[in-house]
Image: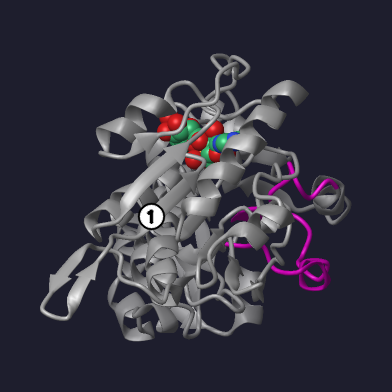
Amino acid sequence: MSVTFGILAEHNDKRVALVPKNVEKLVGLGAKVLTENAAGQNAGFSDEMYQQAGATCIAEAEVIAKADILLSIYPPVRERLAGFPAGKILVSQFRPYFDKEVVSFLQAHKLQAFSLDMIPRSTLAQRMDVLSSMASIAGYQAVLAAAQLLPRFFPMMITAAGSIKPAKVLIIGAGVAGLQAIATAKRLGAIVEAFDVRAAAKEEVQSLGARFVEVAGAQDDADAGGYAVEQTEEFKKKQAALIQEHARQADVVITTAQIRGRKAPVLVEAETVGQMRPGSVIIDLAASTGGNCALTQDEKTIVHEGVTILGHSDLAKEMPQNASELFSNNLFNLLELLIKEGELFIDENNEIVSSTLITK
Ligand code: NAD
């Protein structure tokens, strides 16, 4: 029997997990697609577009009852999930590294789950990597948010009314989000410096025209699959001192430093914030895992001694159309692996399938 996918609407999020272009492709592979009414509305994808792509738009309860595989960007809250019929398959971001109870909860409710944030960081899996796609958008959005909040220009300006110095931007963590932030801040004309504990980051930062702030003596991360590793106390002390010095001179600090499965390292101390110029801005993209700034409050924008601290990790939400398109492409590339002649096919010998399947 052909497999039926169900697209759920997100809550407090304008994005949608699968856009009509990819619905059409799934239908082309012999699958059926049900879409919750108005699921793509806020991202610019109307029900008519879904219907034209071959989907049927129905109420949420019907999608849950009829679909074999339910798709969403974030999983429904526990109270709702508890009511899902046993045997359903869910594809979403369950963050099992952070939510330690999610696997046992899903097992207890006999729900099978693929967690998109568990996609391996291999060349083969890159086209399915939602974390990278969303991080790249967040890095871009972080710079735009900072430029809006900063009471100064980013570029240098020479006008009849006087000259304006370019803004100084410090980016901490030069992974996917950080590199996109560097590129965006450079395009806006700021002076950009960045640093990261991973040795490979130096060349990438410099190739984007930014200055790499170096702290000697970082732990080797060669076997960590692209992720950072925990650093020694001595390294952390040296790093803290250097950040203090550079943050004091920055107009904007964008922090993106994360360590998978752990609380984000605090890299900008409260005292450092107090020493920054009033009007300066900190954008903390690590807010949801504890924040890189000691004063960050998750999902909040606060002002401390004249310094604005924006603590929103999920800035990709703010660009719902492109974010949905990229997420949807990543998701489709994974779903394609789960279909054979229109039917569901879970090949646990495939490394990408086995790494993302968190409950069987
Ligand atoms: P991430 O979100 O886990 O972390 C963000 C950045 O913070 C990383 O660059 C990390 O090194 C840095 N960081 C951690 N602790 C720090 C500290 N104490 N001080 C300063 N910086 C610190 O990482 P990410 O951005 O998702 O990706 C990291 C790397 O993995 C990048 O090189 C990226 O290109 C690579 N990657 C590869 C693939 C793939 O091959 N499929 C996919 C995604 C990412």
Number of other residues with Cα within 10 Å of mark 1, as a class: few under 14, some 14 to 19, many 20 or more: many
User: Would you say residue 264 is visible in this rendering?
Assistant: yes
- In depth, the one of 17 and 171 nearer the eye is 171
Q: Which residues are magenta?
A: 73-100
- Taking the spot 51% from the left edge, 44% from the top edge, the residue there is 246
Secondary element under disc 1, as helix, strand or loop, is strand
Would residue 259 be seen by someone viewing this image from the given angle? no
Residue drawn at (30%, 32%), measured in percent from left and top?
206
Residue 345 x/y as whole percent = 53, 39
User: In which quadrant of the rendered view does residue 33 lie?
Assistant: bottom left
Residue 95: percent from the left, percent from the top?
69, 49
Report whether 122 appears left or right of 290: left
Picture residue at 20% right of the left edge, 69% below the top: 163
- Whether disc 1's CB lies below 8 Å from ligand 1 is answered no
Quadrant in the picture for residue 324: bottom left
Q: Residue at x 57, y 30 (%)?
A: 227
| Residue 75 percent location from the top left of the image | 67, 62
Q: Nearer the viewer, residue 75 or 108?
A: 75
* In-image side of 356 versus 358 (left or right): left
Amino acid of disc 1: Lys
Find the residue positioned furthest to the left: 160
In this figure, what is the number of numbered marks?
1
Specify the quadrant that holds the C terminus: top right
**In this rendering, position of residue 303 left or right of residue 168:** right
Q: Is residue 327 magenta?
A: no
Residue identified by numbered label 1 = 168
Indicate whether residue 75 is drawn in magenta: yes
Q: Picture quarter containing residue 322?
A: bottom left
